[in-house]
Image: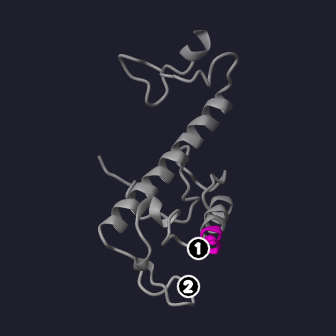
């Protein structure tokens, strides 16, 4: 359609599909701001999935945080891996899950957001001027 052809030159649009919008989220009268917002959310969700996968692989590999998860003496490695850590007989207590979700929500609101005017290089650059190891300064 005409509205989709406006995004044919965006990063990620390549042959043979060109710009691919399988759910039709950009059908109709779409602005560049809506496209940028959807791309921002897609990048953010992709990073969350990458961290979840990394956490799964690391704990399945046997690497757990040292120490106790609560005052009763339960160590981090005493809880099962994967979905069994959330549901099941040996799962993390509900109060612990609430604390984990609250911490993730706090990170989402306080740090994992794109602050304009802080030198961000692209959509989804959450460094906000704080973290710069110089990896993006290349001489060609």
Q: Nearer the viewer, mark 1 or mark 2?
A: 1
Looking at this view, is 138 or 126 the one in front? 126
Looking at this view, is 78 or 48 the one in front? 78
56 with respect to 34 (left or right): left
SS majority, magenta: helix
The span shown in magenta is: 93-99
Disc 2: which residue: 70
Residue at the image position 39 percent from the left and 22 percent from the top? 14
Residue at the image position 54 percent from the left and 40 percent from the top? 42
| Coordinates of residue 139 in the picture (x, y in percent) | 31, 51
**Tag 1 near tag 2, CB within 8 Å:** yes
| Coordinates of residue 60 in the picture (x, y in percent) | 33, 65
Residue 95 is covered by the magenta coloring = yes
Against 28, residue 80 (above or below) is below
Looking at the rendered structure, the secondary structure element under dot 2 is loop
Residue at the image position 57 percent from the left and 90 percent from the top? 71
Q: Quadrant of residue 72?
A: bottom right
Against 36, residue 14 (above or below) is above
Disc 1: which residue: 93
């Amino acid at each position: 359609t005409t509205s989709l052809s406006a995004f044919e030159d965006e990063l990620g649009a390549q042959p043979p599909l060109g710009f691919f919008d399988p759910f039709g989220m950009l059908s109709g009268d779409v602005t560049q701001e809506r496209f940028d917002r959807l791309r921002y959310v897609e990048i953010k969700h992709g990073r969350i999935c990458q961290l979840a996968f990394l956490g799964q692989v690391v704990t399945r590999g046997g690497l757990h945080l040292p120490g106790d998860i609560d005052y009763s003496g339960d160590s981090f490695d005493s809880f099962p891996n994967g979905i069994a850590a959330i549901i099941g007989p040996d799962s993390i207590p509900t109060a612990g899950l609430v604390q984990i979700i609250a911490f993730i929500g706090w990170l989402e609101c306080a740090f994992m957001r794109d602050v304009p005017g802080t030198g961000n290089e692209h959509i989804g650059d959450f460094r906000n001027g704080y973290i710069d190891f110089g990896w993006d300064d290349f001489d060609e």
